[in-house]
Amino acid sequence: MSALRFAGTGRGRVGLVILGFVLAVALLGPFFAPHDPAALVGAPGSSPSGASPLGTDGLGRDVLSRVLWGGRSVLWLSLSATALAFVVGTLIGAVAGYSRSLLDPLLMRLVDVVLSFPPILFILIIATGVGESELILVIEVAIVLAPGLARIVYSATREISVRGYTEAAVARGERTSAILAREILPNILGPLIANLGLTVTFSVLLIAAVNFLGVGLQPPAANWALMISENRDILSINAWATVVPAGLIGLLTIGVNLVGDAISHTLGVAGRQAPTLTPGAAELTPAAELVR
Amino acid sequence: MGVSASAGDGRLTPAPTPGPSGRDAHPLARFVARRVAQGVATLLVASVCVFIGTSVLPGSPATALLGRDANAKAVAEIDHRLGYDKPIVGRYLSWLEGALHGDLGNSSIDIAQGATKAPVWPIIRSPLADTATLAVITIILLIPLSLLMGLVAGLTAGRWPDHLLSTLTLVFISMPEFVVGSLLIAVFFVAFNLLPPVSLVAPGVFPLLHPNVLVLPVLTLLGISLAWTVRLIRVGVIEVVKTDYVRLARLHGISERRVLRRYVLRNALAPSIQIFALSIQYLFGGVIVTETVFSYPGLGRQLVNAVTSHDNTEVQAIALILATIYILINVVADLLVIVLVPKLRTTS
Amino acid sequence: MSRPGGPLLSVRDLTVVLTSGQPVIQDVCLSLDPGQTLGVVGESGSGKTTTALALLGYARPGMRITSGELEISGERVALTDEKAARGVRGRLVSHVPQDPSTNLNPALRVAGAIGDVVHEHRPRVGVDSAVFDILERVHLPATRAFARRFPHQLSGGQKQRVLIACALVCEPPLIVLDEPTTGLDVVTQARILEEVERLHRDRDIAMIYVSHDIAVISQVADYVAVMYGGFVVEQGATDQVLSRPRHPYTRGLVASVPDHTAPRRLRGIAGVAIGLEDRPPGCPFAPRCGQSVDRCSVELPRLEHVDGRSVRCFEAGRTPPIARGDAVARHPTDGGDALLSVEHLTAVHRVGRQTVVATDDVSFRVHNGSCVALVGESGSGKTTIARAIAGLHRPTAGRILLAGAALAPRAQKRPLEHRRRCQIIFQDPYESLNPRVRIINEVARPARVLRGLSKKEAASEAARLLERVRMPADLAAVFPGELSGGERQRVAIARALAAGPDLLVCDEITSALDVSVQAAVIELLDELRASLSLSLLFITHNLGVVASIADYVLILDQGRVCEQGAVDRVFSDPQSPRTAELLAAAPVLRAVL
């Protein structure tokens, strides 16, 4: 599990470089932005010039500055959604997997129902009803991601709860909380970490898609996904306004995926799950629970 | 570890306990019935979620139309016209009843604006057909291409064709549809001016009459769903090649061609039904964004418009249709699998 | 060993290495006449399965055959050339694999699976008639209905017969069988063995039978090759090699085989089997050998003829005769108070909607200091009884008394004293220790939880116990992942002892271990029992192990007790037909002493 083995993978190295670059732009970008991202600095849709190295967008704002400012919201939204999903998913999966009571089928049916919705649809519905705010968006995405994780934690927990060392602890009469903490959780970390990359990727993809559709953000916010949506009309005039943020989002997700893939390979862990399995599928074909 | 009838040859099937006759007689029929019932139950729950999500929570068409500081009386009046002052359960049940009869309600915005009847169904009928066209074309291309590429990748695992395919697919699954779509537009329109940047089709016109506008949206959807399916099929193939029975077939001296056909392919393709079901499901999410990118007048774009204008009823209707299709695909896939894989029928 | 005209089969200088260059098996030479059986014996890591596969020119992924020539029926094949080797497979040499449940194509019916082999090697023969013919020969129903079955519709024994049918249908002169009775219950095992022997005699087919079970080999094989560390260390006529072994490893191995017809205390082999990476230069057995000299650790011995067989040992002349353990002293099994009393225990399993009775009205007692064995095949209910005693399975009727006090069904509801006095050890060594906890902490845990020791006290107690189970002190701080199966079981025993119990419930704790490792663990248990005045409840399916350690035995079948009594009485004078069946089926080491 050494860092060296990870860095040795070709994919891992490339992924780290890409990810590093994108993170640098997103996190450090604002310090280097030449203009205020909301300020009008020139004629709308003008080509790259000295003042605006990437030209201006549909309203006349400097594209470069908006790009440098635009990564943060995508990052913080997806990372918080991922973190929340991990906590909630692990809790649900572990409790359902360990308890043999009614809690087990109840929780997992709930998981199945959530998984039976197309994620974006889910978010759009809630957006219609509840309204749009960044906090709600984070919660929604977490709700969408948590069930997949819960499934993984559930099957891992069930497998571990019948292992000799867990049963030995039960026979010693240890409390359930002690057993979860000492025997179960440390041993499900493997599959969880292996899915980290995949989950973060989904999170980014989902948040970006939703932002693109204009949900969850208020203008004049600078956000890569929103920029793509805003600037499609002037694609033929100043393509940079669309292509640069699109490229950055693409690099972000590719980088995360490469790194996540390399981590999984380093851990040598099988059991990384494909996204949203149909409830029936999970019972019938373990082939769908696959190694990438 | 139950009771094993160890008479004879070390048989390990549990002795059946006496139960009502016919219980074990038709396991297939029982499973089908159970799965369909499960699907219906899920659909009901989904419909509840859709309804609650759009109607009950704060944020009504009234405030959308009139603005946040609207006159309370005006808001109440619109709410009354929309029927929002009636009890929730009643509203849900009448909505559900209507849906089962094909009446998906009236557009909230239109009602709020004064119309007495503005049925939703005609509004979404044409977009539904357009989306269906897009989906069907993508699926027709998806299935053979992914099988071919998945097999090649799996059988050449570790060698350059596999590395190439694995890397390409990894890149494509990492990118959101709108990025792929936008980049495609940038290449095919801006750079080379080969294809239109938007896929505007007049409502009611059959999209296939204008194939140009379909190319980029299909390519976008295909690119990503293909990447997913190829990866999953590839893994399935690799798993099968590693099995003991494939090894034994080779140890028996059976020709590689025969091994490939009867031992590898037959078993690697079995999980592909579920894999295709998954990708078709994915398409229903991807279609929403893709249609927006290309301004294609499909159901997805209709949904986005309805959401932004807070037309609750329209959102409900579209969401219900999409959720139904989603769940239906699950059920059909599971049933197909159980029919085609005899082993699964006799689970102990 | 060879008839005039030369042997049917000979293999010379077979060597297989990992892609990294590390040798897996080296310089293996075997030869066989038509109609003879050669047994290849070895424990885990000896390379016997690699050898079995290499005889067909097959190397597992990550391995390569770097040298080896096969001569069979006059044809010569270089095993390093896979294409050439393919020409031999199925036609001249066929293979019967180990695990029947994973070796049949789930998508093919019985007729299809056998038919494929026929199609390949006897294309002009009518497939149907060939299939029915072979089904009859292996005593399977030669009916259309049976031939149309899929593997999941067959029992374990039936699957194995189908695999044997596939290997025989083209009548090759040589069959290689790799532990073909793994996973089958002992009665089925005996039947398959009979089948194999009969087919071998009827058609004069030569067999190479690979196994870890020396008793089976002694019944089946005319000649035997013993493997250790990738080398053949001794080779010759079975009777000679097993009754008077010349290699120290063979000697230790034979002494560790339990025998229910001649109960003896088991003796293990000192040390631990080496892994692939740690093979020393020189003799692979030298680190564990009681008669090694300096030369043994630096120079690799060659196979020499000594006393009518081939041995790879410099000091072969000095090898003493087998040192069998002493006769087993039995504890009295009646009179006095019972430590554990099980009364009319009944328990069920719920699988979906079905309720299966696992244990039905079982009663017995374990007296202080004695060892009671529960014997039965899988499904007999023995594990359920063990789990019910440990508080892991709630019985539906009956009660369990520990020193007169009733035990609560669930462990969590039991008072501390009850939990402390009764400890359970499980079967699978690879799942019995928490992989994320160092073994010293894992062993210390029961001492802290059940005896209230402080962290420091528990740690020193754990260290003391690890020493007691003969674990080297420098291994105290490792994670279980670095230990072998036998070492892990010893740690599991130490963990159980840390609670200071009076009763140890051992649920098939040696079933997953190699035979010499099993002997070492039994030896240890026996010694601990005496010095700590422990009582043992020993669950197993191996009658030889029962004879070596238990005083009292219960024979279980389908949840019910068929017979119970003192071990010596039950084994010499069985009253129940089931007992007689099990005794007859258990392989016995046939050796002329």
Image (cartoon, coloured by chain):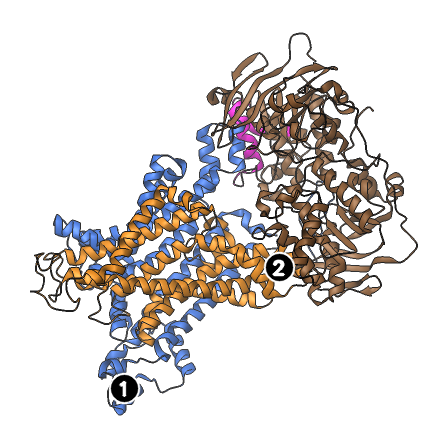
Chain colours: A orange, B blue, C brown
C282 shown above or below C184: above
In the picture of the structure, the residue carrying the numbered disc 2 is C352
Q: Is residue B91 above or below residue C405?
A: below
The kind of residue on which mark 1 rests is Ile
Which residue does the image show at 33% across and 85% down from the upper left? B83
Q: Which of these two is toward me, C314 or B247?
A: C314
Please tell me in which quadrant of the rendered image residue C319 appears.
top right
Q: Left or right: where does residue A103 sit relative to residue B257?
A: right
Residue drawn where x is 20% and y is 52% of the image: B183
Q: Which residue is mark 1?
A: B78
Indicate the position of residue B7 as horizontal and vertical percent values: 74, 44
- Label 2 marks which chain's residue? C
From the viewer's perspective, tell me whether residue B25 is left or right of residue C517. left
* Magenta-colored span: C105-134
Residue C528 drawn above or below residue B95: above
In the rendered view, does B275 fall on the left or right side of C254? left
Q: Nearer the viewer, residue C84 or B77?
A: C84
Q: Could you tell me how many numbered marks the image carries?
A: 2
Quarter of the image where one finds residue C232: top right
> Label 1's element?
helix
Position in image of residue C531 (x %, y %): 81, 48
- Dot 2 crowding, Cα within 10 Å, few <14, some 14–19, many 20+: few
Tell me how far mark 2 sits from mark 1, CA to CA. Answer: 53 Å
Q: Which one is in front, C65 or C352?
A: C65
Q: Can you see residue C196?
A: yes
Q: Tell me the quarter of the image containing the C terminus of chain C.
A: top right
